[in-house]
Amino acid sequence: MPSGGTPGETDGDVPPGSANDAAARIFADALGRKWGKPVVVEDKPGAEGTIGVGSFVSSQDDHTLLYADRRGSVTVAPLLIDKLAYDVERDLQPIACHDRDRFDLSP
């Protein structure tokens, strides 16, 4: 459990009320019960998730924040956007995978 203030989970690349937002809130509720502290979900959608990641990285000062991502803002965006507000290798550390996405292609 993080020490300090209220843990927060930022779900950066989905709008409030979406399925991924609901999943983040279910996860946050369970985590809050385990830690004995509320876990707040703060949605920051836009720019394919890069707004949320940038905000998370810039506010990361007391190690009580978690970030839930659908991977595009940390896998594809660094390949397509020259000047991101974050460096995936330097600023982020993966700790868990809480769901799986399936990606199918057809010819």
Image (tube, rainbow, N blue to C red):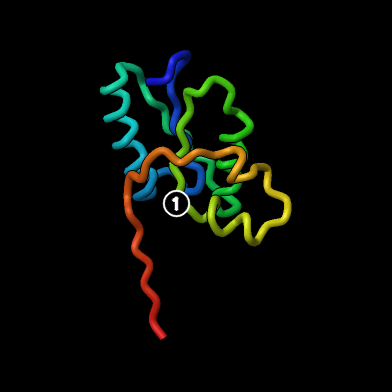
Could you say whether the residue bearing mark 1 is in a helix, strand or loop? loop
Foreground pick, 65 / 43: 65
Residue in view at x 34 percent, y 36 percent? 25
In the figure, 32 relative to 71: above or below? above
Residue 78 lies left or right of residue 16; in this view the side is right
Q: Quadrant of the N terminus?
A: top left
Picture quadrant where residue 30 is located: top left
Side of 88 relative to 6 (left or right):
right
* Residue 87 position within the rendered picture, expressed as x and y whole percent measured from the top left: 64, 44
Q: Looking at the rendering, which quadrant does residue 27 occupy?
A: top left
Q: Position of residue 95 (x, y in %)?
A: 41, 38
Instruction: Sort mark 1 into few (<14), some (14-19) or many (20+) by Cα contacts within 10 Å.
Output: some
46 with respect to 23 (left or right): right
- Which residue carries the number 1 mark? 70
Type of amino acid under label 1: Arg
Residue at left offset 47%, top offset 15%:
5
Q: Quadrant of residue 16?
A: top left
